[in-house]
Amino acid sequence: MSSGRQQKADLLVKVRYKQNLPPPPFPPRLLHIPTHPSRYSTYEFLNPLSSERELPMIVDGELGMPLELGKIAPGSYGDGSYWTGSRTGIAPPLGSGPPVHEDDLDLLGETGGSTSATTSLPSTPGGSSSVMGDRKKVDVSWLRRTEYLSSEGGNKPAPAGLGTIKKEAKAEALAPASRADLISQSFITAHSPLADLRHPSKPHLRAESSWDVLPDSLLWANQLNLVRFGEDPGENKVGAHGRVGADPRLPRAIFRPVEIPDEEGRIGYFLPQDDETAAQYERRREQGEEGIIEGEMFDFKHVRDYEIATSRHLHQEYIFCFEDGQDDEALAAAAADAAGAEKPPVAKRPRGAYFSRLDQAQTLRKRRPRRGEDPTVFPDTVAEGTVFWDGIAVQIRGLDAMPEYDLNERQQEQDKVDKPPAAIEESPEAPAVETAVEPKESQ
């Protein structure tokens, strides 16, 4: 049974009436209002215009105040001495100024020297003089805070080895002969006994072993970048209980950059299909050309897309790889048999620390598709033939499969570390290993 109470309407409709009046039969009449012409000739009439527009102020090099230094004041003696070479009228000689009171003589002295100055002398950061020591003994409450801040730099001892670091930084600007002398001295230090080496700031430390620092000829022709991720780039869960420990597939990841106009750089991230594929791929690469099997493929799958958050070029920054130089095959084989694994590859390079240059440092973040966007479809603005890859089939081949232009360019970079500058010439191809990538287009 409905209640008999009436409710108010929430919607109010405003009634609109039509205009039935006809338009006026004649144009509106303009009325003439008499005004005096002087109203438009006063400066107040332009005030609205001046407030609306910003007029640039153009001044000359002397800011509208020209100074004639060669002009002598009227009535003074020596009007023509300036033109004969005398500058006494505009630049008086030193010592010809007004006399200085005895109490103000200390203000003209240097703070770093040992002079008998009063406590009114202001402190200088980094200075160490008797003046500052005398001033600290004076109990001045309103200067105590300033005294502490200004004296901190002067009392702090200089760190050990600071002068050596500055000398090494200046070595880059020295003449070629001086650089050659510094290089020769470094060889003398390198061949000194380990027992004679001392740490520059910690004398109690002793050197246990040494490595020769050499350029890494195996990686010098490659472009190496330092990449940072905002979070774990691997897959968080594998199986029902998740992954325990580090993901062995991460060191074998493949990046595929795609340039899209009007958009930040997009980078495809690929990982091996499983852990067994990653381990087998790692063994084949370490074995070099001896481990190449014709037709063997390694499947990599697309995990996600990244975009470049920050990127900067690096200058004189390197990455080091330490080689122990172990060449005892029997020892390596015995260790492999004890672990129940295949015989690991034997190190072919001598003991040393091999460095390679870093070109860029990049920070990557996960790319989130926009609303309604299909991440597997690239826009029409990309280069022709660029499509999405949901997987990659990787095959290991020798360097002879590279194009001739790329092979020559690689050899030129290789010669920079393998040969001295005067002996760089065209040389035969060096045996190496490259990775061939075949895309798997998404259906």
Image (spheres, rainbow, N blue to C red):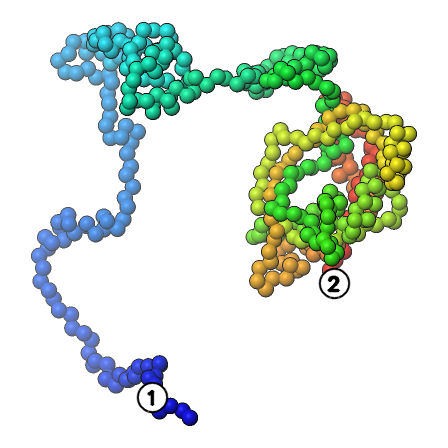
Q: Secondary structure at mark 2?
A: loop
Gap in angstroms between the C-alphas marked 2 and 1: 65 Å
Q: 79 or 271: nearer the eye?
A: 271
Residue at 61 percent across and 51 percent down: it is: 366
Above or below 127: residue 4:
below
From the top left corner, tell me how far across and down residue 205 is, in percent: 65, 18
User: How crowded is the residue under tag 2: few (<14 C-alpha within 10 Å), some, or many (20+)?
Assistant: few
Identify the residue position indicated by label 1 in the image: 6
Identify the residue position indicated by label 2 in the image: 443
Total number of numbered discs in the rendering: 2
Residue 291 image label: none
From the top left corner, tell me how far across and down residue 30 is, in percent: 15, 70
From the top left corner, tell me how far across and down residue 377 is, in percent: 66, 60
Q: Does the image show residue 155?
A: yes
Instruction: Identify residue type, mark 1.
Output: Gln
Can you tell which quarter of the image residue 132 is in? Answer: top left
From the top left corner, tell me how far across and down residue 97 is, in percent: 23, 9
Question: If the image is split into quadrants, where does the C terminus sit?
Answer: bottom right
Q: Secondary structure at mark 1?
A: loop
Instruction: Identify residue type, mark 2.
Output: Gln
Residue at 32 percent across and 17 percent down: it is: 122
Question: If the image is split into quadrants, where does the N terminus sit?
Answer: bottom left
Residue at 60 percent across and 56 percent down: it is: 368
